[in-house]
């Protein structure tokens, strides 16, 4: 079991399958992003060799992310290998949806259970502006295919960015009136070289809530505001789906955080917004034993930072979001 100094049971691993992406969202990475050389990234056999170490230490919940996880070569077989690792009880993916039309069915067959699809606006022009390269039609088709093949319940992730899509939150929230989806509104977090933009264009939870309520009526809190993972859940009157708010900046949820992240280059990062990382790939390549690698994982977990220091203006600079995995 991996426990940290504060008694948190760390059992949820988000694995970044690649740092590469087929979009360039303004809140995530610069347009001229440079990626790591492939030789620095975990190969399929290296990732699959680490998997049993995590499950034996009690990690049972897994999310695949990126960069864009679906652009990883051989993604279906990698998913199959992860899904077949004894001890994996939950396996989901966060994706931009661009390739889901082709990949939803094989991914489901390989053992993926659910997807979160990122959609920040329902307006095609704004969608292109915010993702720089994306097509809303393509992503929508991917979302429908995911639902058709049973990668459900589908969740939608919406990052809200001032000057880009703050006017769209009510339209996106309204999807839950007729669809059994969970739409999650995410406060933009600051990282590395994009931090200035991210802090300047932040839209907080209170404003998102006000914009939705002005158009669609009062939000009803679900479960007395108990967190579902990192999201606080609400419902619109008569809605089929739910609204979640992930307010990492204005209302941090660090006390209940049970997550660790494995970056595509094989570093175990214990807090999204803190630079502390433990390298697993270099020792793996140098022939470290299973016991030594497990010790590195428990050591990293024990030293998980309490939380982030955004309130004191301390921003992680060593990576942008796409290199950590969200
Ligand atoms: N490419 C996939 C996608 O976009 O869904 C997975 C990786 S992406 C880094 C994971 C999630 O992080 C997405 O929902 C994305 O919208 C969100 N995200 C990216 N940059 C962010 C930021 N600066 N603050 C908050 N969320 C962010
Ligand atoms: Fe790519 Fe996802 Fe980052 Fe957008 S948020 S640039 S889709 S990794």
Image (cartoon, rainbow, N blue to C red):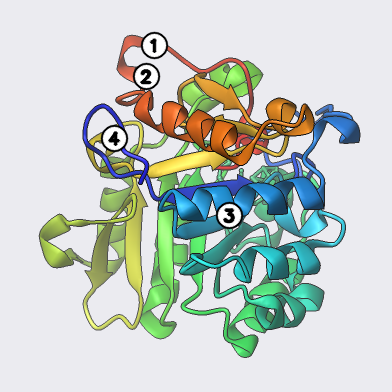
Separation of marks 3 and 1 at Cα, in angstroms: 38 Å
Q: Quadrant of residue 144?
A: bottom right
Q: Earlier in the sequence, mark 3 or mark 1?
A: 3
How far across and how far down the image is residue 80, in percent? 71, 70
Query: As rendered, which of 26 and 210 lies closer to the eye?
Result: 26
Separation of marks 4 and 2 at Cα, in angstroms: 12 Å
Label 4: which residue? 254
SS class of the residue under badge 4?
Answer: helix
State left or right for residue 132 relative to residue 215.
right
Label 1: which residue? 313
Q: Which mark is residue 52?
A: 3
Label 2: which residue? 310
SS class of the residue under badge 1?
Answer: loop
Crowding at mark 4 (Cα within 10 Å: few <14, some 14-19, many 20+)? some
Query: As rendered, which of 210 and 226 lies closer to the eye?
Result: 226
Q: Earlier in the sequence, mark 1 or mark 4?
A: 4
Separation of marks 1 and 4 at Cα, in angstroms: 17 Å
The residue under the point 50% across, 46% down is: 159
Q: Are marks 3 and 1 in contact (CB under 8 Å)?
A: no
Q: Point out the residue furthest to the bottom here.
A: 148
């Amino acid at each position: 079991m991996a426990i940290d100094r504060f008694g948190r049971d760390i059992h949820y691993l988000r694995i970044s399958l690649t740092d590469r992406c087929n979009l360039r969202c303004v809140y995530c990475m610069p347009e001229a992003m440079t990626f790591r050389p492939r030789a620095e990234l975990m190969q399929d056999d290296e990732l699959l060799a680490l998997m049993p170490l995590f499950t034996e230490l009690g990690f049972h919940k897994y999310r695949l992310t990126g960069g864009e996880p679906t652009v990883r070569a051989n993604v279906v077989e990698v998913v199959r290998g992860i899904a077949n690792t004894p001890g994996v009880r939950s396996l989901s993916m966060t994706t931009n949806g661009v390739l889901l039309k082709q990949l939803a069915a094989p991914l489901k067959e390989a053992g993926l259970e659910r997807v979160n699809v990122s959609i920040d606006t329902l307006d095609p022009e704004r969608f292109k502006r915010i993702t720089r390269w994306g097509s809303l039609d393509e992503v929508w088709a991917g979302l429908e295919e995911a639902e058709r093949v049973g990668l459900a319940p589908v969740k939608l992730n919406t990052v809200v960015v001032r000057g880009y899509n703050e006017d769209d939150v009510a339209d996106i929230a309204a999807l839950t009136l007729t669809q059994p989806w969970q739409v999650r509104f995410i406060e933009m977090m600051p990282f590395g070289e994009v931090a200035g933009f991210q802090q300047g264009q932040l839209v907080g939870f209170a404003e998102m809530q006000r914009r939705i309520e002005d158009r669609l009526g009062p939000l009803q809190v679900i479960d007395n505001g108990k967190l579902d993972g990192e999201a606080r859940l609400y419902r619109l009157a008569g809605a089929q789906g739910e609204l979640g708010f992930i307010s990492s900046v204005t209302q941090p949820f660090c006390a209940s955080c049970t997550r660790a992240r494995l970056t595509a280059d094989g570093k175990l990062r214990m807090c999204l917004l803190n630079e502390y990382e433990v390298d697993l790939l270099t020792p793996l390549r140098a022939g470290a034993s299973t016991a030594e690698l497990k010790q590195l994982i428990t050591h990293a977990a024990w030293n998980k930072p309490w939380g982030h220091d955004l309130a004191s203006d301390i921003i992680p600079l060593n990576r942008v979001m796409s290199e950590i995995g969200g």
